[in-house]
Image (spheres, rainbow, N blue to C red):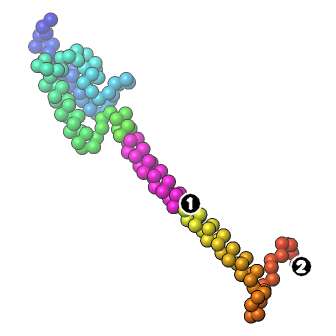
Amino acid sequence: MRITTQQRTENQNRVRAAMDRLLRGEIPPGGNCDIKTLAREAGVDRTAFYGNRPYAHLREEFEARLHTLQQQGTLPDPRLAQITRLKAENTALRQRLTERDETIAELAAFRNEALSRLAAQHDEITRLRTAGPAAANVRRLPTRSTQIGPC
């Protein structure tokens, strides 16, 4: 069915008004900042936006304006902005987690090395204590008492 010039002008005005609302971020529940939602908000058949149909130029205008906003860093759809923000946050958290895992591995290796050195030092001290009476110029230190308080 053909529409009159007046109806086409009214439809184009509704499409442009819906386009402005969507690009300002006034996204209806269950919608996105896309052609499907634009068509639904304007009350126009979505197929009229494709090919050589009457509103193809409006689709191109909408996509160009949307692309310009995205280039400027503005996302009219708050959900897309949230998704973008959460993806960036997720990437940052994964990086922090990787760095923490590396730090934990380094600290565990340091702890193992320190324990090994302490064990070796303890063994050396024990060996020297048993070998101590053989040398005449070595004095034995008193061993530590396990009692608490004055002896």
Q: Which residues are magenta?
A: 85-108
Callout 2–callout 1 Cβ contact below 8 Å: no
Q: Position of residue 138 (x, y in %)?
A: 74, 90
Mark 1 secondary-structure assignment: helix
Between disc 2 and disc 1, whose residue precedes? Answer: 1
Q: Residue at x 29, y 23 (%)?
A: 37
Q: Residue furthest bottom?
A: 137
Other-residue count near label 2 (Cα within 10 Å), few / some / many at <14 / 14–19 / ≥20? few
Q: Could one spot residue 42 in this view of the protein?
A: no
- Residue 48 or residue 143, whichever sits in front: 143
- Name the residue carrying label 2: 151
Taking the image as shown, residue 91 lies to the left or right of residue 59, namely right
Q: Residue at x 25, y 20 (%)?
A: 39
Figure check: 30 above or below 92:
above
Taking the image as shown, residue 76 lies to the left or right of residue 67, namely right
Disc 2 versus disc 1: distance between alpha carbons? 40 Å
Q: Position of residue 6 (x, y in %)?
A: 12, 14
- Name the residue carrying label 1: 108
Mark 2 secondary-structure assignment: loop
Q: Position of residue 71 (x, y in %)?
A: 23, 42
Per the picture, the main secondary structure of the magenta-coloured stretch is helix
- Residue 116 or residue 70, whichever sits in front: 116
**Where does the C terminus fall, quadrant-wise?**
bottom right
User: Residue 79: within the magenta?
Assistant: no
Taking the image as shown, residue 98 lies to the left or right of residue 25, namely right
Q: Amino acid at mark 2?
A: Cys
Q: Residue furthest top?
A: 1
